[in-house]
């Protein structure tokens, strides 16, 4: 039986693997609270509202890979999403994180924060694959839980001494020892829900109708009828109308049917008056989301003759 490995502690010497850019010298492991560069990057992320921005980046990366407007897929757990596509989420994620945080893609790693090189790694699994270039460097690590539709993020100096394996995988990437992650990674974002995907709320029977063979307007009418007072993002509408032209036009055509069949008035974020009305009713539509609200909840001044038609 193999001997259980001992966790390297602060004060121990770390010897990195050779990397393409050249050898990195052995060095002493510092405790996270004593690692000045690690603390500077962590402080910057907190000040930059990392939770909100990383949340948007993760959502964008997932939607990019799912490509709902062409595939009808709206969840990474969909059986039609293969393992290679799931792995692609992590690759796309680094670019979305860089964009959301207002950073730039630059060597020697993925980006720099306050002048300090930072690696960005995403995973839909339980661990991260750290390349040779990322050994002993500061790494922003984002984990996506597809089943629970949530994410979290850590910041860690990924010392070689805290990575597993003798040879690594075929690309010489290594995973992080769980004990090291638990003890030496800084939590940047605790488990946080991702932006809602309304289609995840529907039953199998409801999804069969929303993605059925009837026309777009009828399917969208069913969608809004099933999800009253639920903010529907534009990508959700595009997913329901996948492979069809001008889904927003079809959604507008469905407004009258939604009112007649379900007694719901659709408000659209694109229009300022409707956006402001939705906000007073407690819905943030931004400039592209939609919501179906019971007609009786619409304020009286919006229901006078000649105004109601503008809302449906």
Image (cartoon, rainbow, N blue to C red):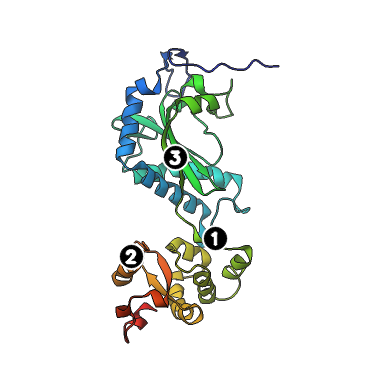
Q: Is residue 36 left or right of residue 238?
A: left
Secondary structure category for the residue under label 1: helix
Q: CA distance from mark 3 to mark 2?
A: 28 Å
Residue at the spot of label 1: 201
Give x and y (percent) for residue 136.
Answer: 43, 23
Residue at the spot of label 2: 279
Nearer-N-terminus badge (2/1): 1
- Hey, which quadrant is residue 109 in on the image? top left
Secondary structure category for the residue under label 2: helix
Q: Are marks 3 and 2 in contact (CB under 8 Å)?
A: no
| Residue visible at 32% across and 40% down in the picture | 103
- Crowding around mark 2 (Cα neighbors within 10 Å: few <14, some 14 to 19, many 20+) is some
| Residue visible at 41% across and 14% down in the picture | 27
- Hey, which quadrant is residue 231 in on the image? bottom left
Residue at the spot of label 3: 190
Nearer-N-terminus badge (1/3): 3
Q: Is residue 131 left or right of residue 169?
A: left
């Amino acid at each position: 039986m193999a001997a259980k490995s001992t966790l390297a502690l602060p004060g121990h010497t770390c010897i990195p693997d050779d990397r393409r850019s050249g050898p990195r010298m052995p060095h002493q492991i510092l405790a996270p609270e004593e690692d000045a560069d690690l603390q500077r990057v962590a402080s910057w992320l907190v000040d930059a509202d990392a939770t909100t921005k990383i949340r948007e980046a993760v959502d964008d990366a997932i939607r990019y890979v799912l490509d709902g407007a062409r595939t009808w897929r709206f969840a990474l757990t969909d059986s039609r999403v293969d393992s290679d596509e799931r792995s692609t989420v992590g690759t796309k994620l680094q670019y979305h994180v860089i964009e959301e945080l207002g950073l730039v893609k630059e060597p020697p790693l993925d980006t720099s924060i306050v002048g300090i090189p930072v690696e960005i790694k995403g995973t839909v699994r339980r661990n991260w694959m750290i390349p040779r270039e990322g050994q002993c460097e500061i790494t922003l690590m984002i984990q996506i839980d597809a089943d629970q539709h949530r994410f979290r993020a850590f910041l860690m100096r990924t010392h070689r001494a805290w990575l597993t394996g003798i040879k690594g995988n075929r690309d010489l990437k290594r995973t992080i020892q769980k004990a090291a992650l638990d003890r030496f990674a800084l939590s940047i974002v605790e488990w946080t829900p991702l932006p809602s995907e309304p289609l995840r709320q529907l039953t199998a029977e409801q999804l069969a109708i929303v993605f059925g063979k009837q026309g777009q307007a009828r399917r969208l009418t069913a969608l809004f009828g099933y999800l009253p007072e639920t903010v529907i993002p534009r990508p959700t509408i595009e997913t329901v109308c996948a492979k069809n032209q001008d889904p927003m036009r079809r959604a507008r055509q469905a407004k009258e049917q939604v009112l007649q069949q379900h007694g719901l008035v659709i408000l659209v974020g694109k229009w300022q008056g409707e956006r402001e009305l939705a906000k007073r009713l407690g819905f943030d539509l931004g400039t592209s989301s939609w919501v179906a609200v019971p007609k009786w909840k619409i304020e009286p001044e919006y229901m006078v003759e000649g105004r109601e038609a503008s809302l449906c």
